[in-house]
Amino acid sequence: MLNKLREQTVFKGNWLLSLLVSVGVWQCSVPVMGQMLLPYTPQLNSEQLEQQGLEVAEEAAQLIRFQQHDLALSRAKLAVQLAPNKYQPWFILGTLYIIKQELEPGVEALEKALVLEPEEVGIKFTLGNAYFQQGKYQQAATALEEGLEIKADVPSAQFDLGNAYFKLGRMAEAIAVYQKAVAQQEEFWPAVNNIGLIKYEQGNISSAIEHWQKALEIDEEQAEPILALGVALYIQGQKEEGLKLGEAALELDSNYGEIQHLKDNLWGEKLIKDTQTFFTTPQMQAILAQLEKDS
C-alpha cells in the first residue's frame, strides 16, 4: 500500500486592476507642454505585490481543499510570480504538481520552497513522498527523517518513511516506523497491512495473516488486505476460504487483479509468486475473465 498526494474563493477577473490602483500605478503627473512624452514606468511596491502573492497562494490552497486543481494551479503559478521569495507559493505549486503526478516540476518547486524555508516540515514530508514516487528512495528517506526529527507525531510521514525503508531493504526499520504510525493513529490500517507484506516476505506467514486480519478489523472493505489474506490462506491449504476472499477483493477493486498494481503497492516477490499461482485457479481465472469483459 502506498500513500499518494487534495472556503472556495471566487476568482475576481478584475483583481489586477484593483492591485494596480492599490499600488498607485495610476498616479502620474501631467507632462509639461513641449516635453517629449516618455512611456510611464510604474513604481510598484514590492511588499504589496508580495502580500498579494501570499493571498493568491492562500486562494490556491483553498481550491486544493475542494479538489479544484486546475484553478488552483493557475493561482499558484501567479503567486510565485508575485512572491518569488516566499516559500508558501512554491510549496503550494509543488504540491499541486505532485497531486497531478507531474513529479519533475513538482520536486523543482518544492526544492525552491525548502531553500527559502529549510525547517518547514510540510515541505520535507511532501518532498519525501515525491522522491519516493520518482524511485529516489534514499532521498525520500532522508527528507522524511529530517522532517520527523522536527515533528515526530505525523503518521502519514512515518508511513511514507516505512515505505522508503521497505524499498531500501531496511525491513526492521520499516516495521518500527509502521508501528509508530499505528501507535499515533490506531486505525491506520495501511501501516498494519504493510507489516503483513514484510512478514510474508520473511516467511512468517502466520504473522502476516494476523496483520491482515487486524487491518480488516479496522476497515473490512479494503481490497488489498482481503486479497493478501486470501492468497495466504489458499497457500496454507484453506483453499475454499482463500478463493472466497480473492473474489470479494476483486469485486471491491478490480485493479488488484493486475500484477503490476500489486508490485506498485509494495507486494514482494514471494507474495507475487503465490498470487500468480492463486490467479491460475479456474475460479480466479473465471473472475478475472469476467472483470476484463466488463471493463
Image (cartoon, helix red, strand yellow):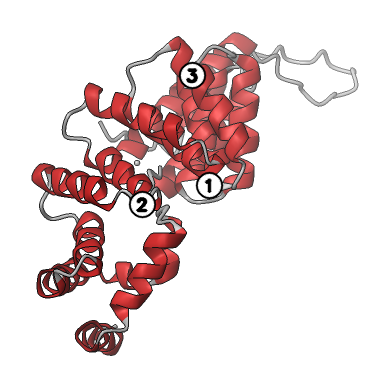
Binning the other alpha carbons within 10 Å of mark 2 as few (below 14), some (14 to 19) or many (20 upward) gives few
* Distance between the alpha carbons at the discs numbered 2 and 1: 27 Å
Task: Give residue 26's position: percent from left, percent from top.
Answer: 61, 19
Residue at horizontal 56%, vertical 19%? 87
Q: Is residue 222 visible?
A: yes
Q: Are marks 2 and 1 in contact (CB under 8 Å)?
A: no
For the point 28% across and 89% down, the residue is 289
Residue, disc 2: 203
Report x, y in % for residue 25.
63, 18
Q: Residue at x 37, y 45 (%)?
A: 198
Label 3: which residue? 147
State how many labels appear.
Answer: 3
Classify mark 2: helix, strand or loop.
loop
Place of residue 112 in the rendered image (x, y in percent of width and height, measured from the top left) = 65, 26
* Quadrant hosting residue 236: bottom left
- 228, 209: nearer the viewer: 209
Please tell me the numbered disc located at residue 221: none
**Mark pair 1, 3: CA separation:** 18 Å
Which residue is at the front of the view, 9 or 243?
Answer: 243
Label 1 or label 3, whichever comes before in sequence order: 1
The quadrant of the picture occupied by the C terminus is: bottom left
Disc 3 residue type (three-letter) = Gly
